[in-house]
């Protein structure tokens, strides 16, 4: 059975293509062959080509791993310790959120006087 077509927003499509372009430019600037980068990342050359084209079916783990190997900064962060701090802040903020979000009912706000 084939994969289902992904319904991406235009912004998501553009972001995938831009990230793929950045990965390819960084790989070429470092003088890395596609075969070498694919081997280092533990993926096939075909998967790397898909990532560099911005293919939406590529796993996010593989995309981020390849980006990290060639030095493409993720989330505007160039220092790995900053990324760790960003992750911790996210975990702290998520801990403050409710465990579940319930669908709001029409009568939830009835009778409230603010």
Image: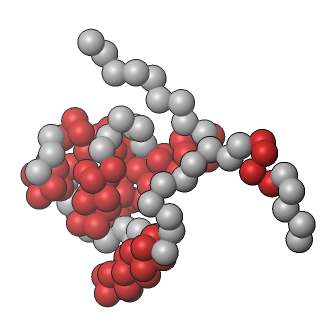
Which of the image's four quarters has the C terminus?
Answer: bottom right
Q: How many dots with numbers?
A: 0
| For residue 85, side relative to residue 9 (left or right) | left
Q: Nearer the viewer, residue 24 or 91?
A: 91
| For residue 42, side relative to residue 60 (left or right) | left
| For residue 108, side relative to residue 34 (left or right) | right
Residue 11 picture location, percent across and down: 61, 47
Q: Is residue 59 above or below residue 30?
A: above
Which of the image's four quarters has the N terminus?
Answer: top left
Q: Is residue 49 above or below residue 72?
A: above
At x 41%, y 38%, the residue is 56
Residue 48 picture location, percent across and down: 25, 44
At x 60%, y 39%, the residue is 9
Q: Is residue 90 visible?
A: no
At x 32%, y 40%, the residue is 58
Residue farthest right in this picture:
113
Q: Is residue 6 above or below residue 23?
A: above
């Amino acid at each position: 059975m084939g994969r289902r077509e992904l319904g991406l927003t235009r912004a998501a499509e553009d972001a995938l293509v831009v990230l793929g372009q950045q990965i390819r430019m960084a790989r070429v600037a470092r003088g890395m062959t596609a075969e070498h980068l694919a081997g280092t990342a533990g993926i096939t050359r075909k998967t790397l080509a898909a990532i560099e084209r911005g293919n939406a079916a590529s796993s996010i783990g593989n995309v981020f791993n390849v980006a990290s190997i060639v030095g493409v900064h993720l989330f505007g962060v160039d220092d790995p310790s900053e990324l760790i701090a960003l992750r911790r802040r996210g975990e702290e903020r998520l801990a403050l959120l409710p465990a579940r979000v319930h669908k709001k009912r029409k009568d939830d706000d009835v009778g409230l006087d603010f």
